Image (spheres, rainbow, N blue to C red):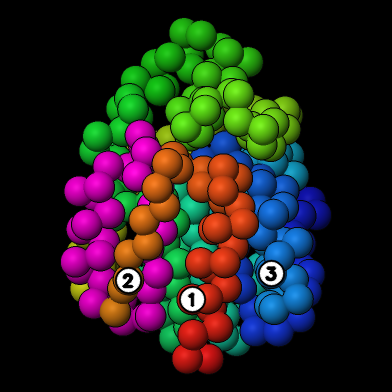
Amino acid sequence: MQDIYVEDIGSGYPLVLVHGFLGSAEMWSFQKKYLKRHARLIIPALPGFGENYKLKSKNSINKLAKFVLKIVKKKKIKQFNLLGHSMGGMIVQEIIKIDRKSVNKLICFATGPIGEIPGRFETIDETILRLKKDGIKKSIKRIPQNWFVKGKKDKNFYYCLKAVKRIKKNSIINALIAMKKWNGLKNLSKIKNKTLIIWGNKDSSYKYDQIKILNKNIINSKLQVLKNCAHNAHLEMPNKFNKILLKFLKSDE
């Protein structure tokens, strides 16, 4: 059995961080530095991605949610806070559906209720077609540029390039299929957890109407909008992002 890469650092109440499409555990670097004094951070790389690029990828959000849950349970963590970015935001919603009693607070960051992602900079089918046409090298440089206001000129863009250095085409396609198949709309009203929704107002992956659906249907949710940020606010404005995150985690502990 292959080793599973997961970071377990810091001390305090556990926070599980789930990265997004084409992501890695390392993409939470700024959050690790800031939060490790306040929480025990559990940061897995999803199968087929980042540090776990050798693991067999999965083609459903449910399977990815079970992968994360298995890691947490193996560490004998009974309750935890949960943060998911983009595709990771779909995964954390699915985790609550599977095991709602284990999750305390929820953070949905740059994500939505539907995997098809209406209003995305291009449809998922278009991404798959362009990947097959352009090849993996061109695609893994092109796609993340949409996630920053400054595109590839952002000083932290290299985290995205590093994350996909050894990724396989099949892992990308499986993740896109997983997202396309997923729909979490019916589950939203069942999420009773205290929830923070974080969204950058320049996000070209998730339009405001998708964020509004989350905010309206998750009964105990609060929306925090980051101005002049795109899809990767945790890398674009890490200090601001981290302060918002910590304030939420520390509120009414």
Disc 3 designates what residue? 35
Q: Position of residue 161 (x, y in %)?
A: 67, 29
Residue at left offset 41%, top offset 58%: 198
Q: From where the camera sits, is residue 54 visible?
A: yes
Residue 180 placement, left or right of 140? left
> Residue at (51%, 47%) from the top-left corner?
233
Contact (Cβ within 8 Å) of mark 1 with mark 2? yes
Q: Is residue 199 magenta?
A: yes
Which corner quadrant of the image does residue 15 belong to? bottom right
Magenta span of residues: 190-219
Circle nearer the N terminus (1, 2): 2
Q: Residues within 10 Å of mark 1 (few under 14, many from 20)?
A: some
Q: Is residue 240 above or below residue 166?
A: below
- How far apart marks 3 and 2 lie (CA) works out to 21 Å
Residue type at mark 2? Lys
Secondary structure state at the residue bearing disc 1: helix
Give the side of residue 63 with respect to residue 141, left or right. Answer: left
- Which of the marked residues, 3 or 2, is nearer the chain's N terminus? 3
Separation (CA) of disc 3 from disc 1: 12 Å
Q: Please tell me how many numbered marks the rendered image carries.
A: 3
| Kind of residue at badge 1 | Phe
What residue is shown with label 1? 248
Query: Which of the pair 100/86 is nearer the observer?
Result: 86
Say whether residue 161 is left or right of residue 201.
right
Residue matched to label 2: 222
Local crowd size for mark 2, using a 10 Å CA cut-off: few (<14), some (14–19), many (≥20): some
Q: CA distance from mark 1 to mark 2?
A: 10 Å
Amino acid type indicated by mark 3: Leu
In the image, residue 248 above or below residue 88: below
